[in-house]
Every structure is written in structure tokens, then in C-alpha cells.
Image: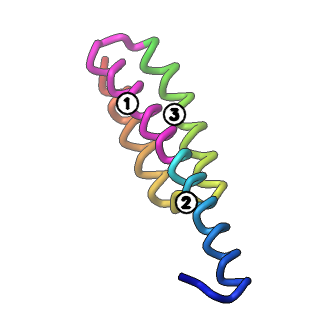
Amino acid sequence: MANIKSAKKRILVSNANAERNKAIKSGVKTAVKKVTAAVESGDKAAASAALVEATATIDKATSKGVYHKNTSARKVSRLSKAVNEMA
């Protein structure tokens, strides 16, 4: 356990940031699952709409520093490829 006041504060700030990052990552996973479900069901319109929302969610997570730029680009690319290959 930290004894110094600044170290105690860093623990609190670190925990708050970790919770925030966890929530953002969870939102990204949910958006990706929605796209995947729409692709598997074969509904191109729903998949396209879900892709737009997922892309926005992933980009927002990247701008907040939760994901690296290349990680988000890879995620968006794979989702786009899945939707585009539907038909």
C-alpha cells in the first residue's frame, strides 16, 4: 500500500482510467458483435448500418488512446471486408 500522498492519488487516477478504458473496449466489442451478427444473418442493410456505428465507436476509442491507430485500422478493415463480401 502506498504511503505517499501523490502515490495514493496516482492509484485512484489509474483505477479511474482503467475503468474508463474497460467501458470503451466493451462498447467496441458490442459494436463488433452487432456487425458480426448482421453478417451471419445475411442482412446486408443491417450489416452496413452496424458497420457505420462500429467504425465510429472504434475511431472514438482510438482518439481517446484506448486503441493504437493500427489496431483500430485492422478492426475496421476486417469488419468492412466481412460486410463487402456478403454479396
Tag 3 secondary structure: helix
Question: In the rendered image of this protein, does residue 67 appear above or below residue 35?
Answer: below
Tag in front: 1 or 3: 1
Q: Position of residue 36 (x, y in %)?
A: 33, 27
- The stretch in magenta equals 25-44
**Tag 3 residue:** 54
Quick one: label 2, few (<14), some, or many (20+) residues within 10 Å?
few
Compute the Cα span from label 1 to label 3: 9 Å
**In the image, what residue occupies the spot 36% across and 11% down?**
43
**In the image, what residue occupies the spot 54% across and 37% down?**
55
Q: Earlier in the sequence, mark 3 or mark 2?
A: 2
Question: In the rendered image of this protein, does residue 7 appear above or below residue 59?
Answer: below
Q: Quadrant of residue 86?
A: top left
Q: Is residue 20 left or right of residue 25?
A: right
Three-letter residue code for mark 1: Lys
Q: Position of residue 27 (x, y in %)?
A: 51, 38
Compute the Cα span from label 2 to label 1: 22 Å
Three-letter residue code for mark 2: Ala
Question: In the rendered image of this protein, does residue 73 appear above or below residue 12?
Answer: above
Q: Is residue 86 left or right of residue 27?
A: left
**In the image, what residue occupies the spot 59% across and 84% down?**
2
- The reply to whether callout 2 and callout 1 are in contact (CB within 8 Å) is no
Quick one: label 3, few (<14), some, or many (20+) residues within 10 Å?
many
**Tag 1 residue:** 33
User: Does the magenta stretch mainly form a helix, a strand or a loop?
Assistant: helix
**Tag 2 residue:** 18
Q: Position of residue 41 (x, y in %)?
A: 28, 13
Which disc, if any, is residue 51?
none
Compute the Cα span from label 3 to label 2: 22 Å
Q: Position of residue 59 (x, y in %)?
A: 59, 46
**In the image, what residue occupies the spot 36% across and 35% down?**
81
Q: Is residue 44 left or right of residue 41?
A: right
